Image (spheres, helix red, strand yellow):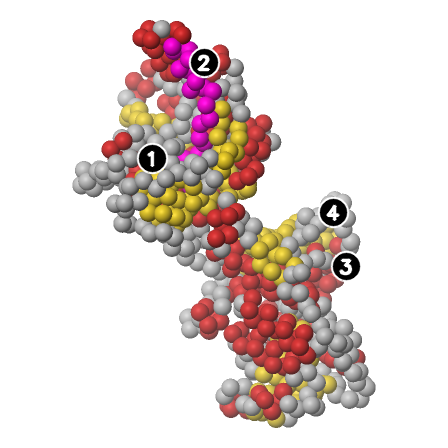
């Protein structure tokens, strides 16, 4: 197996082939899925290894003292050999990971092979493909928690132990000095506990991140912003606790802590920073200085860590393992979010280059993960898992005879629900050259209602009769999502031109079935109801935006809102997820604006709700971010979109207003003066006109079938990305 190691004498980093560890009693053998780089502790160790011998001695005076003691006891030659032998050896890196139990040792009965676990320990949770982990240093991962997030378990436990040492209470105010990985987690844990937090860090990016994650205010410790925020939140009394999560040789953190803590406040040291306590300042306020020892009680106790002897919960409530389990539970319930902390995910094979980039400062990161492809593939969760975009195969030539202008296009509708009767049929009923021939529904009454309201010649519940009617030119499939793919397949095999509302399919197998019908019949006359690309306002805005030469960034906010109780959209087991049902709209719009099909999809969601963040990557480097949220205000517009490239910005506000900004000037065109919902035109009428034209003339369909398939595959890949917690590559079938 492979493992990341470092030679402390030379500073060399390497990925070595080493033997697989044995599965000893009292622990489990874990195959790693993700391991986390501690950008504080590990980088400090990596940096120290690159120092001269004198530099190493200066950075570790504790070790120098041990060497001097050894000299006094064993003499210089023996001590020299011992020290150089230890320095000139490979040492492991890493202490926080998530993986799958491969083998269970004797005496372990709380997990089994195949279970997902989070692991801790700088001797057991290493950057290696396989690790043996003793019982008290692993815990099962809650259902639904992504492995890449569970890999934060150890650093989360360190932050949690620090917070526990501060003994925060509801309504208190705390100051967190240092907003690196541990500091960001401390901010979130305190916020979850009902504590208002002020953060201090010289990096404005980290300050902004902490504020997004719950801090009341953050700023540079050298400025007056932090002191002002503390004064405002505490009425001038000072904070109840200060958490030192900073590193380095500056004494500024402990001096700032004394200045901003209240009388008899608590100062907790979590990081490794200089601690020259200003005696007068700490004495006058009688500050309580505490240290937080790693992951919690049990740390450095061989009986606990190696022999598996637990501490009775009545005497020690929060041990290492209980802290680890507690942090994972907070992640699973959405009380803590680590995804915004992930600055980079690197392949395990690229570990050396990743460490070097971090050390040199080329990679600015809060948290970096290593992913292990072999394990990810076995678990269906590759760092870049693939979803195959099916190839469109055609046999023969599709025959679509043109019709004279005097011959009406005869349409049949399968389904007559709310969308069909409100957004499609009103346009078609008024269109010249269109004949509404037959409406098919599962209940006779709904068919009769549609016939009466829109003037269908016939109403029936017999689908086969419609598909066998050679006089019908095109079939609209506007039923519930679960039936779309099968009805489309049948209509294509019957030789009909098909308009199917989104989604085309709920699964890859359903999509493959539709394409098999295309190949078998030679009939590729298919349109999916992706109407937004036909919206006149958006079409005009795209025209005014013009061609682009460089990659674009697209942001699409969909304020979807809550569904009413009883909506069939909530029947996810039968009808698919809500995003699978309508997400194709937004992916298709993005792809049309960027004039390409996506090559990868990354999706993440907060546990317990349907809010999604979907990032699409395109061949030229363009990206599209779709924020699909259900928790927004009902009065806010449903859809807002920004396209940015080449010094230009296209802005769309809910299909009632659009703007194009370029070179410092504003080209603004408002095509609809009213903001009323009736003024919104999302393109249904224009889409239907294009479809009817294609049916009448026998010309190309409005959207190429390959594009429809790519959009459907990307929509389906969102679910795969959510399950795996990693980007999904959209691989074109060969």
Asked which quadrant contains residue 580, the reply is: bottom right
Query: Which of the two discs, 2 and 3, labels the residue nearer the N terminus?
Result: 2
Query: In the image, what residue occupies the spot 65% across and 81% down?
Result: 493
Query: Can residue 67 be seen in the rendering of this structure?
Result: yes
- Give the side of residue 658 with respect to residue 216, left or right: right
Disc 2 designates what residue? 58
Q: How many marks?
A: 4
Note whether residue 186 is visible: no
CB-based contact (under 8 Å), mark 3 and mark 1: no
Q: Which mark is residue 550?
A: 4
Q: Residues within 10 Å of mark 1 (few under 14, many from 20)?
A: many
- Magenta residues (range): 78-97
How far apart are the two marked residues, 3 and 1, measured between alpha carbons?
58 Å
Residue under the image location 25 percent in, 36 percent down: 307
Mark with earlier residue (3, 1): 1
Of callouts 1 and 2, the N-terminal one: 2
Mark 2 or 3, which is nearer the eye? 2
Q: Which residue is mark 1?
A: 295
Q: Nearer the viewer, mark 4 or mark 3?
A: 4
Which of discs 1 and 4 lies nearer the camera? The answer is 1
- Badge 3 element: helix
Q: Secondary structure at mark 1?
A: loop
Q: CA distance from mark 1 to mark 4?
A: 48 Å
- Using the rendered view, name the quadrant where residue 526 is placed: bottom right
Query: Magenta stretch: residue 96 in it?
Result: yes
In the foreground, 356 or 23:
23
For the residues labelled 4 and 2, the Cα–Cα distance comes to 50 Å
- Mark 2 closeness class: few <14, some 14–19, many ≥20 residues within 10 Å: some
For image coordinates 46% across by 35% down, the residue present is 18
Q: Position of residue 548 (x, y in %)?
A: 76, 51
């Amino acid at each position: 197996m492979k493992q990341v190691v470092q030679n402390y004498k030379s500073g060399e980093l390497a990925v070595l082939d080493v033997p697989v560890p044995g599965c000893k009693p009292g622990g489990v053998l874990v195959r790693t899925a993700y391991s986390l780089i501690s950008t504080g502790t590990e980088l400090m160790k990596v940096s120290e290894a690159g120092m001269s011998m004198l530099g190493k001695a200066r950075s570790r005076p504790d070790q120098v003292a041990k060497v001097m003691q050894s000299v006094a006891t064993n003499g210089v030659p023996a001590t020299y050999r011992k020290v150089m032998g230890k320095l000139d050896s490979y040492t492991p890196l890493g202490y926080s990971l998530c993986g799958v139990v491969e083998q269970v040792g004797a005496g372990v009965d709380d997990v089994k092979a195949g279970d997902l676990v989070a692991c801790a320990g700088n001797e057991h949770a290493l950057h290696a493909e396989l690790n043996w982990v003793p019982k008290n240093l692993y815990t099962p991962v809650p259902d639904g928690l992504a492995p890449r997030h569970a890999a934060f378990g150890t650093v989360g436990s360190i932050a949690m132990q620090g917070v526990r040492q501060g003994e925060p209470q509801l309504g208190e105010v705390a100051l967190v000095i240092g907003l690196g990985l541990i500091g960001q987690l401390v901010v979130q844990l305190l916020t979850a506990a009902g504590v208002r937090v002020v953060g201090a860090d010289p990096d404005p990016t980290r300050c902004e991140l902490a504020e997004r994650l719950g801090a009341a205010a953050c700023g540079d410790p050298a400025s007056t912003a932090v002191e002002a925020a503390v004064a405002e939140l505490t009425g001038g009394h000072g904070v109840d606790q200060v958490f030192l999560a900073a590193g380095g040789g500056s004494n500024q953190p402990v001096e700032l802590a004394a200045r901003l803590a209240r009388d008899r406040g608590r100062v907790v040291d979590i990081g490794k920073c200089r601690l020259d306590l200003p005696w007068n300042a700490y004495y006058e306020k009688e500050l309580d200085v505490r240290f937080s020892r790693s992951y919690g009680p049990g740390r450095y106790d061989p009986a606990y860590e190696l022999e598996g002897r637990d501490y009775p919960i009545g005497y020690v409530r929060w041990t290492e393992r209980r802290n680890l389990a507690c942090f994972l539970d907070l992640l699973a319930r959405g009380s803590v979010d680590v995804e915004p902390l992930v600055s980079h995910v690197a392949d395990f094979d690229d570990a050396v280059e990743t460490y070097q980039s971090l050390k040199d400062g080329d990679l600015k990161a809060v948290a970096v993960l290593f992913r292990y492809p072999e394990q990810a593939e076995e678990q269906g969760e590759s760092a870049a898992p693939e979803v195959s975009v099916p190839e469109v195969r055609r046999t023969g030539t599709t025959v679509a005879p043109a019709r004279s202008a005097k011959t009406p296009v005869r349409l049949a509708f399968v389904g007559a629900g709310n969308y069909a009767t409100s957004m499609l049929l009103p346009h078609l009923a008024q269109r010249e050259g269109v004949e509404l021939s037959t409406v098919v529904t599962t209940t006779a009454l709904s068919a009769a209602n549609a016939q009466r309201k829109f003037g269908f010649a016939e109403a029936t519940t017999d689908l086969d009769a419609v598909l066998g009617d050679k006089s019908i030119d095109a079939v609209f499939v506007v039923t519930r999502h679960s039936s779309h793919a099968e009805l489309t397949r049948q209509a294509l095999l019957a030789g009909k031109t098909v308009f199917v509302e989104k989604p085309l399919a709920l699964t890859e197998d359903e999509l493959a079935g539709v394409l098999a019908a295309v190949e078998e019949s030679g009939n590729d006359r298919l349109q999916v109801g992706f109407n937004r690309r036909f919206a006149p306002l958006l079409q005009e805005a795209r025209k005014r935006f013009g061609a682009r030469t460089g990659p674009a960034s697209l942001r699409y906010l969909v304020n979807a809102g809550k569904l009413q109780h009883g909506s069939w959209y909530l029947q996810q087991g039968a009808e698919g997820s809500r995003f699978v049902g309508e997400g194709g709209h937004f992916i298709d719009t993005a792809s049309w604006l960027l004039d390409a099909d996506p090559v990868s999809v990354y999706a993440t969601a907060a546990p317990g709700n349907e809010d999604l963040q979907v990032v699409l990557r395109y061949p030229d480097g363009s990206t599209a971010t779709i924020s699909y949220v259900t928790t927004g205000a009902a009065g806010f517009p449903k859809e807002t979109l920004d396209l940015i490239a080449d010094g230009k910005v296209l802005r769309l506000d809910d299909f009632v207003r659009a703007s194009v900004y370029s070179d410092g000037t504003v080209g603004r065109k408002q095509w609809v003066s009213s903001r009323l919902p009736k003024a919104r035109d999302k393109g249904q009428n224009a889409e239907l006109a294009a479809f009817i034209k294609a049916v009448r003339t026998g010309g190309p369909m409005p959207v190429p079938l390959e594009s429809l398939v790519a959009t459907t595959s990307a929509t389906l890949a969102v679910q795969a990305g959510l399950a795996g917690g990693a980007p999904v590559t959209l691989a074109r079938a060969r």
